[in-house]
Amino acid sequence: MDKLIRFFAIGVLICTPISVWFALSEYLRISYILLLLAFVSDAIYSLFHRESKLIVFQSNTQRQRFLFVCFIGIIVISFVVNSVWHPQPKLMSNFIGTLGIFFLLYFYYSSLVEKYLSVVLCFKYLAVSCVLLIGIIVVDSVLVNFFGIKIHDYFCIGYNGNTDYFSRFIWTSTAAPTEEPGVSAQFLNALLPFALCHFKGRKRALVCLGYAYCLFSLFSTTGIVTFVFIAMVYVFLFSRRSVKLFLLVFTISLAGFVAVFYQANDEFQMYVNQIGIIDKVAFSGKTASDADRSEGMKLAVDNAMEAPLWGMGPGYGKAIRETGYLSTFLGFMGNYGFLGGFLFILFWITFLQKIKKMPDIPEKRALLASFLAVTVAACIGDCLHMFMLWFLLPIINKSYNHSLRRGKLSVA
């Protein structure tokens, strides 16, 4: 039974970025289905073996669990208060769904990682997950652009999200196994550090080439901006030479490269105009994407100000806007008030603090880069229902505890 549960756990990690393909519904994605299978198997095993516990808490997580339980308490209060004073159609379903997500993706998933996976296996199979995602994007992109073959619909069997192929001048970008190209780019940025940490030599070079192709093929502003942000933070924190000089040369070179190609190449200019990097980063409202996002974020803050202690209730953003608040952190504030949002942010910061305390080795840098990518995704997207928000958390805890015991990490 142990081997079967470990098999499901490994499958969960490998399927991390597959959020739409094979999904039966928004709450039954392939990674969640595998988690449920692991949970049922684990529950049966625990039932007949009293020495085995179904839920095991990771070491040194008391503060995290306290903050998270307080956050859940605010959600319960928000649900009760708004059921009486501010009822809306999505209140009950989102309340139940949110608690279910918390149990499965935080409490049980953390227990699963703690009991059945080592740090080595976590890094290895997240690296495999990255390669799988790159392979899917490359194959899908080549087929649709050079052969006119769209394979996406063959893998959507229940939940489609807002997925589709997007025509961009001379290129068609694909959402691959996720909701949209931007989500695929976010998963790429979050998983790439594990691939770079695990693979060496030519394999690492091939991963980098595949990543570069995928990132620009997806036409995702989020992906490109997140990559640049993480690269800058990485250099600033870990370069042992002249950081200021390196940043200056890097910035000037990048600006010069973009300026030359932007002026000299009409196709490149059309590419830049279509993805609208400046407009989206500045929330100018000139593109549908940034206008929708800025409107949702503003609404989240307005709703939090209306009910700062308990918010407008679970699911309120989706009840009044089809796309919701479009920010995980601001969404928590809109739904559960400033207090609820603040508690979750404190909870989130505890993981960054643990990464910071680890030994200064490549594995720590991989965790930091991935954590930053997930944080950016959560700031500018609604990730509550996505495995993106949760997959890294127990691995950070396990790596931190491992570093305390051993004094270093070794996952090569």
Image: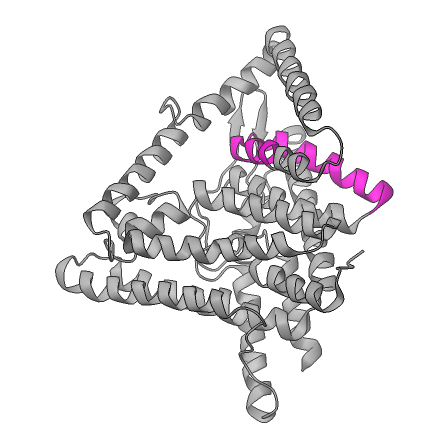
The coloring applied to the image is one colour
Magenta segment, prevailing SS (helix, strand or loop): helix
Task: Please state the extent of the stretch shown in magenta in the rendering.
Answer: 200-229
The residue shown at (66%, 21%) is 248
Q: Nearer the viewer, residue 197 or 266?
A: 197
Q: Quadrant of the N terminus?
A: bottom right
Q: Count the marks: how many?
A: 0
Give the x, y percent position of residue 297: 33, 39
As displayed, is residue 248 above or below residue 302? above
Residue 93 in view, yes or no: yes
Point 49% across, 53% down: residue: 349
Up-down relation of residue 177 to residue 124 (above or below): above
- Left or right: 134 with respect to 333? right
Indicate left or right for 401 with 345 as reference.
right
Can residue 22 be spotted in the picture?
no
Image quadrant occupied by the C terminus: bottom right
